[in-house]
Image: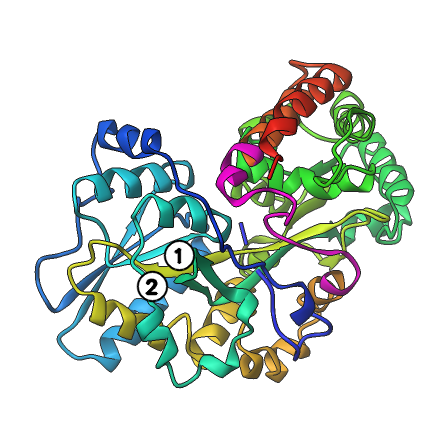
Amino acid sequence: MKLRPVSALPAAGSHLLTRRKSLTAFGAAAAAAALLLSGCGAGGTSSAANSNEITVWHYFSDPNQVKVMTDYAATFEKNNPGKKVNNVYVPYDQLDSKLIASAGAKSGPDVVVYNGSDASTLALANTLAPIDDKWSSFADKGQFPETVVHQVNGKTYGIQGYVNLLGLWYNQDILDSLGIQPPKTMAELEDAMAKATAAGHQGITLSGLPQSQGEWQAYPWLSSAGFNYSSPDAASLKKGLGTAQDWVNKGYLSKEAVTWDQTVPFQKFAAGDVAFAENGNWQVGTAKSSAKFKYGVVPLPVDNGKVYLGGEAEGIGAYAKNPDLAWTYLQQTYLDKAGQLTAMQDAGSLPSRKDAAADPSVTGNELLKPFADSITSHGATYPDQAVPAKNVANVQLAVGQAWSSALGGQSTPEDAAQALVGKLTPLLQK
């Protein structure tokens, strides 16, 4: 999922990810459960014993995001002759559990690239090493706003190397054929989807997975309906879930969305027969390499709704075999100006460093500008500050399940909303 840039991009600095801090104990039950998880490796149970190698765990399957990892490995190996990077793919929905299991066995990767919202879960489960000493002495520390620094109980566990958020991708060829302009409001979007569907196209693609990716994509539409975590109510949830279910019933959105992570919907869009896609700036590379039609991006037309500012954080494994070499890798890749521009060029990620965010290759990019504009108009901290850090994962799961249930038709919007409010009420207690 994804994060936010700094002052060099319009108003980005004021909406960066909130640091996770002042957290309560994780709970013995989670630690005990971790020891029961089978297998802690994802192609390997720990980082390589060889002092010249580091292992990097990530969950990227999109070719352009994988290219970032490959390019970073090449940069590090070029800068450090004789050293080697082992990139290890772990499916998104397995990364946390495998990290917790590996920590229970006192093993694990050297570098972890993880969903920034999972910082508290992973740190409190002892899967990440504090990096305060390394971070405090980092020469370029001043290039990063504090809000991209992930802290738990006053200790630093990760830094975000880039910023990701959602926008509305559109197929310019389809819109031109129908005489439609890119929508700026929910009403315009629904009118455009109706016309596209009537013409034999699909209206929109998005993720309806019953977990955090579903919550990430649901939040703009739910907040547009008036939902907020500070005072959750069934009426706004019913409205938001009802709108999405209506899209399925009218044929704008495939019911198969409940099985799609954020990669699949964009692949469907890039195939050329879908008018719109709710997806992120990280798909710029995929669009350029796969789409055989004219396309563009506008901020999500969610009226007064909000769009999460998220992304991956990078840290060092609690049981890294080569933590110093891991820190060198991070300095030369995710935390480096040139490294951040590599991620922007490969995958469209918005840099978190001030100097990288101010680079003309970023500020002059017509596809990235709408995302920067959305930061200004709709940006929201991720996770929401009203959600207690210890309950972030459970809240995301509950909302993702309600979203998926409504899209899949397993629940009416009213039933899904009532059930969700019942789950959220205790989880949102401070």
Question: As shown in the figure, which amino acid type bears the numbered disc 1?
Answer: Val
Nearest the eye: 160 or 23 = 23
* Mark 1 → mark 2, Cα distance in angstroms: 6 Å
Q: Provide the residue designation for mark 2.
A: 70
* Range of residues picked out in magenta: 375-395
Q: Is residue 316 left or right of residue 314?
A: left
Pointers 1 and 2 in contact (C-beta within 8 Å)? yes
The residue positioned 42% from the left and 78% from the top of the image is 336
Magenta segment: does it hold 405? no
Q: Within the image, what quadrant is residue 90 found in? A: top left
Question: As shown in the figure, which amino acid type bears the numbered disc 2?
Answer: Thr
Horizontal and vertical percent position of residue 167 = 70, 53
Q: Provide the residue designation for mark 1.
A: 66
Q: Is residue 402 left or right of residue 231?
A: left
Nearest the eye: 334 or 397 = 397
The residue positioned 59% from the left and 83% from the top of the image is 359
- Find numbered disc 2 in the image and state the secondary structure of the residue it sits on: helix
